[in-house]
Image: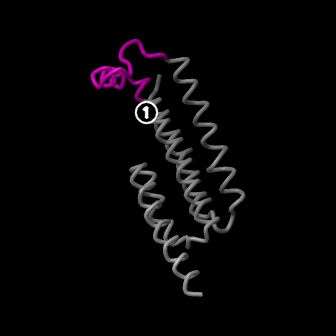
């Protein structure tokens, strides 16, 4: 099994979704469909295929030592990587949808996308912070009017 090739292919495939998200203000429907559904579903199918067709023989999820043994196996490591790619892209798509729905300027969203791609939860936290600030400003504007 050529895990390096799989790694490269799923990485490029995932990156297509992230590139589409950068154009989401101008093509929201396509962005929602491609980055928020099609690519994550394809990655999920690939994830399940890896888990079913390339089962691991050792390790588990019961404690840290079992996880360490599990991810020492290439098939489990690949499944974990695909899992990260799929979920991070789903969060990126959610960020773009939420920002559009709440009229958050896209310039505030752009930094959240690479942070989400690279550091998952940190990008989600960054967007949540930006969103909270936007909501507070919007609420203050309504109170003044």
**Residue 50, image x, y percentages:** 53, 24
Q: Position of residue 144 (x, y in %)?
A: 55, 86
In the picture as drawn, the residue positioned furthest to the top comes out as 57
When the figure is inspected, residue 51 is found, relative to residue 138, above or below; the finding is above
Q: Residue at x 33, y 24 (%)?
A: 67
Q: Secondary structure at mark 1?
A: helix
> Which residue is denoted by mark 1 in the rendering?
4
Q: Residues within 10 Å of mark 1 (few under 14, many from 20)?
A: few
Measured from the top left, where is residue 125 in percent x and y? Answer: 42, 56
The residue at the far bottom in this view is 145
Q: Is 142 left, or right, of 30 in this rendering?
A: left
Residue 4 position, x and y percent, is 43, 33
Residue 68, above or below 104: above
The image quarter containing residue 60 is top left
The residue at 58%/60% (across/down) is 96
**Magenta-drawn stretch contains 68:** yes
Residue 99 lies in the magenta stretch: no
The magenta span reads 55-77
Residue at (53% x, 54% y) in the render: 92
């Amino acid at each position: 099994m050529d895990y390096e090739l799989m790694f490269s292919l799923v990485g490029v495939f995932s990156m297509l979704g992230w590139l589409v998200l950068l154009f989401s203000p101008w093509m929201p429907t396509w962005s929602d469909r491609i980055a928020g559904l099609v690519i994550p579903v394809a990655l999920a199918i690939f994830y399940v295929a890896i888990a079913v067709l390339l089962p691991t023989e050792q390790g588990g999820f019961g404690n840290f030592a079992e996880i360490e043994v599990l991810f020492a196996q290439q098939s489990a490591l690949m499944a974990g990587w695909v899992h990260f790619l799929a979920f991070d892209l789903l969060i990126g798509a959610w960020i773009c949808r939420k920002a559009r729905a709440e009229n958050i300027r896209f310039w505030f969203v752009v930094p959240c996308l690479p942070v989400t791609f690279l550091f998952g939860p940190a990008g989600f936290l960054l967007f949540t912070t930006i969103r909270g600030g936007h909501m507070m400003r919007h609420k203050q504007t309504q109170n003044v009017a």
